Image (cartoon, helix red, strand yellow):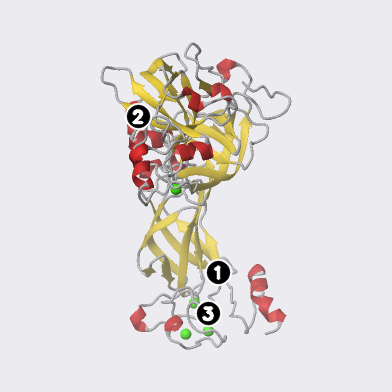
Amino acid sequence: MSPFLKYCAPLGLLLLGLGCSDGFGTLRVSSVLRVNIKTKDLGSREQRLPISVLTPSKFDISIEAIDRNGEVDTNFSGYVRLSTQPGTIQSLTGAGVDGRSVLLTDGVADNLSLDLIATYGDTFVWAEDSGYEPVAVSDVPSCSNGIDDDGDGLVDFPVDPGCAFANDNSEESGTFAAGSSVPIFFALPRIADVRGVELGGGSTSYPNEQVRIDTGYNSLTNKFGFRTVVTRLAQDGFFATDLEDSRGYSSVFAFTFSTPPDLQPCDILTSLTGTAYDFFGFTELNFPTWTIQRWSGKDEDCLVPVPQVLESTKLASEQAKQSLVSGLVRVYTGKFERRDRSGNVVETTDTTVSIGTHFGPEIPASGIPGDNASNCDINGDGQVDFYTEPEKSCSSQCEADVQCTDWTSYSQRSTFNLIVTDNAAGGAARKIQVDGTVSSSLRPLSLKGKTIKAFTGDLRYFSGGNQYTIVAGCPADIVTDLTKDVDPKACFFRTDSTTDDPQ
Ligand SMILES: [Ca+2]
Ligand SMILES: [Ca+2]
Ligand SMILES: [Ca+2]
Ligand SMILES: [Ca+2]
């Protein structure tokens, strides 16, 4: 095959109409497709339609092939395939429908009903004539008959590129006629939607999709309906919280490889876009882009919420913890009244935070962790074998023991456990893993058995290990001295050189 023929088809695609003769399929684009949405309410930029990953949005549609004169091309008869961008076609029903394809007869398919789910933003419904003619497998489709029906030297699905599926009854590629609907204006997802709140919040509703998040800022009116604030910077990204979503799951991590430049807690996001991705159960935005309204520097203008204090009820609840992932959390010794911005007390907790005594480099006697003995790497190969005795039962003993910090985790990652005890009579005690590596002066082992004042940070989740970890953002997040209290402005510093003012 000559190079010309090889590149003929793609070139023909670009210059619709030029067409291309035999040798690499046949292009005979003579019409475009038009998707008519007959349902009246398509939303608008000002009044967007609600989004859902569970409840479909229903539209009555028709599809027409339009010729060069703008008339219905009555010579067009064949299947066209529908798709939506973004989102998913949950169902397509009506005469001539097969899956997501529909047969146009004399250039028209009418009275179709289309159900879309997981759409968001400006959505288009596409139709394309890709030469797919679905038939029952019992009819021995051309793409499954062992014969080179169109004489291009390629036989059947998936070898012949003209075969869309095995049940395609045409080895040809269709006319490539295509076209879309006018835009349907759906709402943008809020952080909780991206976190998958509708499906329980365990994973994103938009895996590997690029999403533009509704941060509350309306660029048409230059007004905020609600606000989304940068709460923390990290070595590899930043955290943001939607301040007014009562559904929970309202914080997310944006992964930027290194600390993002010229950004600071208290900045308000006016836009936020990224590719939603679940990294071991931790939903993050990859390749994020954003715009901000910079924080004025005045305390009263900083909207970073007071961290949620974790007590035993929250620590015992998988759902409560998941809901708080990527948000600011705190464990605290004493009575703590969390107030809203109007000064109203929204939550009162009374707890004690301490470091367990079963924490140290020695191998536990009889495999049961004890004082200075929480090292379950019994054979000394550098890791704990969770599947083979005796390390298996040693590590599960440590896991169940509120006083125990797995020594191997501590020695490798500097993470350790804090015990949170409710101060009410008979109060329960739970432990939570923390990461204080940001503080070079912290000596967790020397605090063994002691009570500390507070530990604040962002709550991270990792399905592959000790699942929840509070990661301190700056040394001031860790208050070990019981006579001191938390600094409400801990970690509020900008990453540019001019105003860098750690703590
Ligand atoms: Ca064939
Ligand atoms: Ca063929
Ligand atoms: Ca085909
Ligand atoms: Ca081992």
Q: Position of residue 145 (x, y in %)?
A: 43, 86
Where 478 falls versus 40 (above or below)? Answer: above
Q: Position of residue 202 (x, y in %)?
A: 39, 44
Which one is in front, 225 or 143?
A: 143
Residue at disc 1, secondary structure: loop
Q: Which residue is mark 3?
A: 160
For the image shown, how many numbered marks are present on the structure? Answer: 3
**Cβ of mark 3 under 8 A from ligand 2:** yes
Labels 2 & 1 near each other (Cβ < 8 A): no
Which of discs 2 and 3 lies nearer the camera? The answer is 2
Q: Image point 70% across, 23% down: which residue?
A: 499
**Which residue reaches farthest top?**
483
Residue at disc 2, secondary structure: strand
Where 142 falls versus 203 (above or below)? Answer: below
Marks 2/3: CA–CA distance: 61 Å
- Amino acid at pointer 1: Ala
The mark found on residue 177 in the picture is: 1
Mark 2 crowdedness (10 Å alpha carbons): few <14, some 14-19, many ≥20: many
Residue at disc 3, secondary structure: loop
Q: Position of residue 215 (x, y in %)?
A: 53, 35
Which of discs 1 and 3 lies nearer the camera? The answer is 3
Which of discs 2 and 1 lies nearer the camera? The answer is 2
Q: Quadrant of residue 115?
A: bottom left
The mark found on residue 93 in the picture is: none
Q: Which residue is mark 2?
A: 430
Asked whether residue 30 is in view, the answer is: yes
